[in-house]
Amino acid sequence: MARRDIEELPMCQSIVLDKSYLQATGAIPFRDMLKKRRFLMPSVLFYELMSTSEPGRSRCFAKIPEMENPFDVITDIDNILHAEIETQEPFGVLEDYSVDAPYFFNPKFKEQSAYDFTDTETRLLGEWEKYFAEQVKLLSGWMENLYVNFPKLKEGSTEQRSLKHKEIEAKIVGDEDVIRLLYDAIWQPEKSKPPWPRADTIDSHWALYRWVQAKLLFALDAGVRYQGSMPKPMSTKTYTKFEHDMIDLEYLVQGVLQGSFATKEIKLKNWFLVLRPDGEVLA
């Protein structure tokens, strides 16, 4: 599906924003876009911006108007999943998970100088760092389980493995039975505390379903790069790449749930379009 031009997008649809789009779009075009559409800011975007070195951080914040609530800040995926587990029902509407409080971004974020984080900001950044470190560790398990369920990913020539990779990716994207099977096999919902929804009750309307899809896509992508197992020892450069993947996973899931996504990342754009062929992407 070819992307639609900005002018063709419905005015009522809010858009999930990722860092790559904010970073690559000029200040004037971005502010013009804000006059036409409402952006949803995943909480992970704030983490990415705050952890970006200068001058990247200040250049991004300089594009954001000094106004109350320039974006709807959406809670992280874990909270949305927990809501589904608690209610045993699909998440509903993404805007319902926005932060219900007025806020302004600190004007100092726009200054190209060293910034001393507040105690609260330091704590939040530390929590995000620990969360993504854990997600990188878990990625190894997702990858190994994927290869256990599809052992032919390791067999044959490079060309044969590539064809198998495309076949499995197509199943992850379009076969609900495969998603439910792997949801049962890898995450074992009945053993979770509290019990997760049964596999036969979830479908593409659930955040849990989209979360499993995204995790499998990233695990498959990493598995192809590293022949099914995480590199050991892991270099700082490799770890940073995996952390970026886990951040991108958060963006992708929220973009897919919303059905409207602003990203410059080619991989995310391509996955979004196959997961939401009815969706809209600004790229």
Image: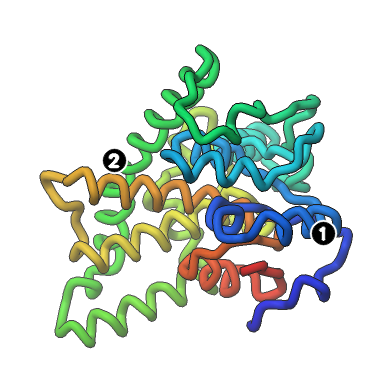
Give the residue at x 58% y 67%. Answer: 272
Which label belongs to residue 129?
none
The answer to whether 11 appears left or right of 224 in the picture is: right
Q: Quadrant of the N terminus?
A: bottom right
Query: In x, y percent, where is residue 239?
Result: 26, 45
Amino acid carrying mark 2 in the image: Lys
Query: In x, y percent, where is residue 45?
Result: 56, 42
Give the residue at x 38% y 52%. Answer: 185
Q: Quadrant of the C terminus?
A: bottom right
Q: Are marks 1 and 2 in contact (CB under 8 Å)?
A: no
Indicate the secondary structure of the residue bearing disc 1.
Answer: loop
Give the residue at x 61% y 33%. Answer: 79
Amino acid carrying mark 1 in the image: Gln
Q: Identify the residue under disc 1.
A: 13
The answer to whether 147 appears left or right of 206 in the picture is: left
Seen in the picture, residue 77 relative to 35 is either above or below; the reply is above
The answer to whether 176 appears left or right of 131 in the picture is: right
Give the residue at x 32% y 50%. Answer: 242
The alpha-carbon separation of the residues under discs 1 and 2 comes to 36 Å
The answer to whether 78 appears left or right of 215 in the picture is: right
Farthest residue to the top: give it: 119
Q: Nearer the viewer, residue 142 or 3?
A: 3
**Circle 2 residues within 10 Å: few <14, some 14–19, many ≥20:** some
Q: Identify the residue under disc 2.
A: 137
Q: Nearer the viewer, residue 98 or 50?
A: 50
